[in-house]
Amino acid sequence: MKNPLNVIWNRGEPVLNGWCSIANTFTAEIMAAQGYDSLTIDGQHGALDYSDALPMLQTISGTGKTPLARVPWREPGVIMKYLDAGALGIICPMINSSDEAAEFASYMRYPPLGQRSFGPTRAGFAYPGYNLTDANNEVLAFAMIETADGIRNLEDIAATKGIDGLYVGPNDLALGFSNGSLPSGLDREEPEVIEILQRIATTAKSKGIHAALHCGTVDYAMRGLEWGYDMVTVSGDARLLAAAASDTVNDIRTRIGGSVSDKTTGAY
C-alpha cells in the first residue's frame, strides 16, 4: 500500500488536486480522466453522503488517481469509515487548536500511533498487502485552517504529531479572520489575507509538512505554488460544469443579441 502523492512530493513536484461535490460516479470518472494527481470527495459541503462516496472512491481508485475525502467534521466514525472505504487522505474542517489537531490525527492511525478501529472493509481489498504499518505511514491527515483561532494557533497545529498537511479554505479563512466583515470568495486579494496565506505555507514548510490551497483559477494556483504551497485545488466539478455551461450560453446569446445569464457560484 503506497500513497502516490508521497511519491510525487518525494520528486519535489506539486500535487494537482481535483474536487468532486456531485454525487455521481460518471462525474467522478470524467474528473479522474482529466489528469489530476488526486481527487477529493467533498463530504462536507458536497451534495452527497457516504452511500454516494463509496462507489465514487471505487471509480477514482480504478483510474489510478489518489482518492481523498473531506469529512463533515472532526468525528471519528465518519473519518474511519472513509478510510475503511479506501480514502488515502482526509481533509478535516475547522481545526482550531493543537488539541483538536491531535484528536483528528489520532482517528487517522491504528495503535500505537492512534485510535483508529480496525476494519478496512474496502481498503483491505483495494490495496493488496494491506497492513497496519503501511496504512499508518501512507494515509495523509490534512487539518483545515479557516478560523481566527486556527490562525492564532497555526504554529502549534502545524507541529502536531500526525498532521501531514494544512489545507486552506479561503472562504471561511477570510470570514473567520475578519469576523465576518470580508465577503466570501476563493482567490483573495486583501493584503492581510494574502499575508496569512503566505504565513500558512511558510509555517507548514518549517514544520516539514505539506500546504494545500483551494483556488478558483489557474493564475491564483500558480501564485500559491510560488508562495510555497505544494498542493493546489483549482475549482471543482460543480463550478467547472457551471462555468462551461454559462460560457456557452452567454456566447450564443451574445451572438444572437439575447440576455446574458449570471454564472452560478458555489461555496468551498
Image (tube, rainbow, N blue to C red):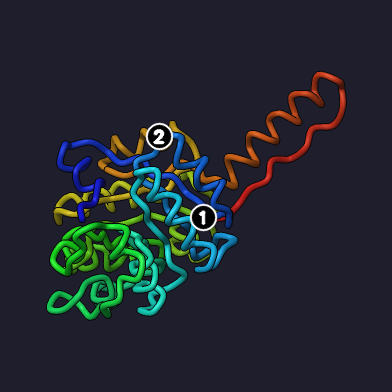
Gap in angstroms between the C-alphas marked 2 and 1: 22 Å
Quarter of the rendering containing residue 176: bottom left
Nearest to N terminus: mark 2 or mark 1 = 2
Q: Residue 102: horizontal and vertical position, in percent?
A: 23, 75
Q: Residue at x 50, y 68 (%)?
A: 50
Asked which secondary structure carries label 1, the reply is loop
Q: Residue at x 43, y 73 (%)?
A: 73
- Amino acid type at mark 1: Tyr
Q: Residue 267: horizontal and vertical position, in percent?
A: 56, 55
Question: Would you place residue 247 above or below residue 95 in this image?
Answer: above
User: Which residue in the structure is indicated by mark 2?
Assistant: 35
**How many numbered discs sit on the rendered protein?**
2
Residues tagged 2 and 1 counted as in contact (Cβ below 8 A): no
- Amino acid type at mark 2: Gly
Q: Residue at x 63, y 37 (%)?
A: 243
Asked which secondary structure carries label 2, the reply is loop
Q: Residue at x 56, y 47 (%)?
A: 26
Question: Would you place residue 25 above or below residue 156 in this image?
Answer: above
Question: Would you place residue 122 above or below residue 65 in this image?
Answer: below
For the residue pair 3 and 156, the one nearer the viewer reads as 3
